[in-house]
Amino acid sequence: MRVLLVSRIDNPDALAFAGRIRSILVDEAGCEVTAERDTAAGLGIEGASISSVDADMAVIVGGDGTILRTIQKMKKPVPVLGINWGEVGFLADLEPEDAPDFVRTLNQGFSVEERMRIALMKDGVCLGVALNEALIVTTRPAKMLRFSIVVDGITTEEFRADGLLISTPTGSTAYAMSAGGPIVDPRIQGFLLVPLAPYLLSSRPHLISSSRDLEVRLESAKTANLVIDGQKTIELGTSSTIVVKQSPMPALFVDVKRNFFEKVDHKLSKL
């Protein structure tokens, strides 16, 4: 089995742990391991860019940011096994103390869980694909934007707010939760819309089926940016129509057989 190894590189302990995981994968699990270029430099070995590696799975030591960045750089989705070396790490299913034993079993096979992603389109062009969320936010702090939400061709809501989060169910435990959105079962296929500091308290989060046609119209005198998974920023100007669709290529995660709600309860208890 071919494995891509990625680690956060700003933490010497994380890099050292990634080196330990690499040894287990090679010596005990019989895997062929290629380290991502920056990770490899930290370990003193040869590496390759994420987009150039043809792997069967990826093992990532880091927080949610490291996992999101890795998935964004992949040419095609491969199953991801996240080992938490961040603050909370909702996308990382294993803690460091549990990882070595699990990694030793990978050559026996594993099951995979799909996570819905969203594609953001403008004028027929895909701006990017998000696993957690897409954020529309003003480029000028403390200035509000005006939004219209169009579902199946019908304008369902118009509001002013500092910004708007378009989240997946997976992203409901990320920025969307901090902004007052609900925790959503990742097995649900839907778009979660969470206004940021809306002018009217009646502007509430919405969970919309991914089978519906969804458009977000920005109609404002202030310029705005679209930020995808905190990794990619696109200028939208003052007027844009963003079409939101379910991506045909979901993200793939190694299933460690841990109940989602048990994991969320454990993660939140640490905050």
Image (spheres, rainbow, N blue to C red):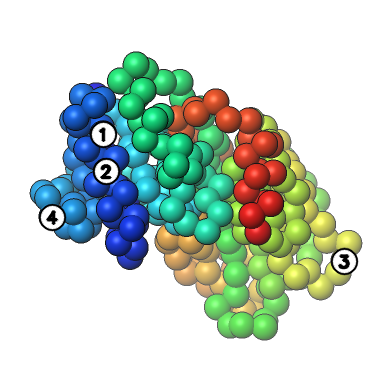
The label number, if any, that marks residue 24 in the structure image: 1
Pointer 3 or 1: first along the chain: 1
Residue 258 x %, y %: 58, 30
Mark 4 crowd level (few <14, some 14–19, many ≥20, 10 Å Cα) = few
Q: Can you identify the residue that label 2 sits on?
A: 20
Pointer 3 or 4: first along the chain: 4
Location of the N terminus (image quadrant)? top left
- Residue at 20% x, 58% y is 42
Q: Can you identify the residue that label 3 sits on?
A: 201
Residue 111 x %, y %: 45, 21
97 displayed left or right of 224: left
Q: Can you identify the residue that label 4 sits on?
A: 44
The CA span between labels 4 and 1 is 17 Å
The CA span between labels 2 and 1 is 6 Å
Mark 1 crowd level (few <14, some 14–19, many ≥20, 10 Å Cα) = some
- Residue at 52% x, 51% y is 89
Q: Please name which of the two marks, 4 or 1, marks the residue nearer to the observer.
A: 1
The quadrant holding residue 144 is bottom right
Q: Is residue 176 visible?
A: no
The residue lying toward the viewer, choosing from 213 and 93, is 93
* In contact (CB < 8 Å): disc 2 and disc 1: yes
